[in-house]
Image (cartoon, grey):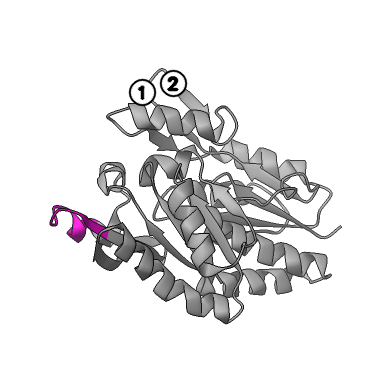
């Protein structure tokens, strides 16, 4: 056995992936005030999280995994010669730094990669790593495939409000969209691991059209696609119907990322 892959919990995983013996997930956590802390995607169902999120006036805070949590994950795959670690964008969290610090405590190869993404984007990158691994690729070939996937991966998403991104400090260059005219509904994207404006539209239909305009050529070119949402089944279903592809998976976005983008967010990743 040569390579194991460690991801953090903000990586959306298609069904069956987490059960693989060569995959480990290190969870982040989120808190609704000082008395309510939950492990991401473990302690609350997504439905329970969405319900709580809709009732609070202050968005939850989030916390990166400890260095010890990564060390424990690395040690749990000691039967493997190499470890590849995939984390969400370091511009969103200190998770990457925790993973790197833990890697320095081991005496075997551990490569930590900033996916510059999260949720469905990171999930597609993970699937690319597993594809090369299952095809018998070497550790170097898996790393090369992941680095290429990081460069190619695109995420476009819509949010119900920019309030959550603003309050969490993850709004990035989309800051300039705050305070715009009534019913301005921006389409955002991730660029180099940061939230940036993609298109400023007015009304939900034009917002959806802006996502489709960018994504349809990618679908027609045969790109892998994945979807994600925070309690936004209706617009997500419309997006999937318009694109005409089921996608590799559909992610119900968990507590950590959901705390930052807020209820009603939905989007698509492709590479």
Q: Is residue 111 above or below residue 77?
A: below
Q: Which of 237 and 170 is in front in this view?
A: 237
Whether tag 2 and tag 1 are in contact, CB under 8 A, the answer is yes
Marks counted in the figure total 2
Q: How crowded is mark 1: few (under 14 residues within 10 Å), some or many (20 or more)?
A: few
> Is 181 one of the magenta-colored residues?
yes
Question: In the rendered view, does 126 fall on the left or right side of 156?
Answer: right
Name of the residue lying farthest toward the top: 35
* x and y percentages locating residue 145 in the rendered image: 66, 73
Q: Which label sits on residue 232?
A: none
Residue drawn 84% across and 49% down?
Answer: 79
Per the image, label 1 sits on a secondary structure element best described as loop
Residue drawn 55% across and 75% down?
Answer: 219
Please report the bounds of the magenta region as a residue range: 175-185
> Is 68 one of the magenta-colored residues?
no
Q: How crowded is mark 2: few (under 14 residues within 10 Å), some or many (20 or more)?
A: few
Residue drawn 71% across and 52% down?
Answer: 107
Per the image, label 2 sits on a secondary structure element best described as loop
* x and y percentages locating residue 45 in the rendered image: 56, 31
Q: Nearer the viewer, residue 215 or 97?
A: 215
Q: Nearer the viewer, residue 195 or 51?
A: 51
Which part of the image, by quadrant, shows the N terminus? bottom right
* x and y percentages locating residue 112 in the rendered image: 59, 58
Residue occupied by mark 1 = 33
Residue occupied by mark 2 = 36
User: Does residue 89 appear in the picture of this structure?
Assistant: no
* x and y percentages locating residue 182 in the rendered image: 15, 53
Q: In this view, does 236 lie above or below 217?
A: above
Question: In the rendered view, does 265 fall on the left or right side of 196?
Answer: right
Q: Is residue 156 above or below residue 183?
A: below
Q: Quadrant of residue 126?
A: bottom right
């Amino acid at each position: 056995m040569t390579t194991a892959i460690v991801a953090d919990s903000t990586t959306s995983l298609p069904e069956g992936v987490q059960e693989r013996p060569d995959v480990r997930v290190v969870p982040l956590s989120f808190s609704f005030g000082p008395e309510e802390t939950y492990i991401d995607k473990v302690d609350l169902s997504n439905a329970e999280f969405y319900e709580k999120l809709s009732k609070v006036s202050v968005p939850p805070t989030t916390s990166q995994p400890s260095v010890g949590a990564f060390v424990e994950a690395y040690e749990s795959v000691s039967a493997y010669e190499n470890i590849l670690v995939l984390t969400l964008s370091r511009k969103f969290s200190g998770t990457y730094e925790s993973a790197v610090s833990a890697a320095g405590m081991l005496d075997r190869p551990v490569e930590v990669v900033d996916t510059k993404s999260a949720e469905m984007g990171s999930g597609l990158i993970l699937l690319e790593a597993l594809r090369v691994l299952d095809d018998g690729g070497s550790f170097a070939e898996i790393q090369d495939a992941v680095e290429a996937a990081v460069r190619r991966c695109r995420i476009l998403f819509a949010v119900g409000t920019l309030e959550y991104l603003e309050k969490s400090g993850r709004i990035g260059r989309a800051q300039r969209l705050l305070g715009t005219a009534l019913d301005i509904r921006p389409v955002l994207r991730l660029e180099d691991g940061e939230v940036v404006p993609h298109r400023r539209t007015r009304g939900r239909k034009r917002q959806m059209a802006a996502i489709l305009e960018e994504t349809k050529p990618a679908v027609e070119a045969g790109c892998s696609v994945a979807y994600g949402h925070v309690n936004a089944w209706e617009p997500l279903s419309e997006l999937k119907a318009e694109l005409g592809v089921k996608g590799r998976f559909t992610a119900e976005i968990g507590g950590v990322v959901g705390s930052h983008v807020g209820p009603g967010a939905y989007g698509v990743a492709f590479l």
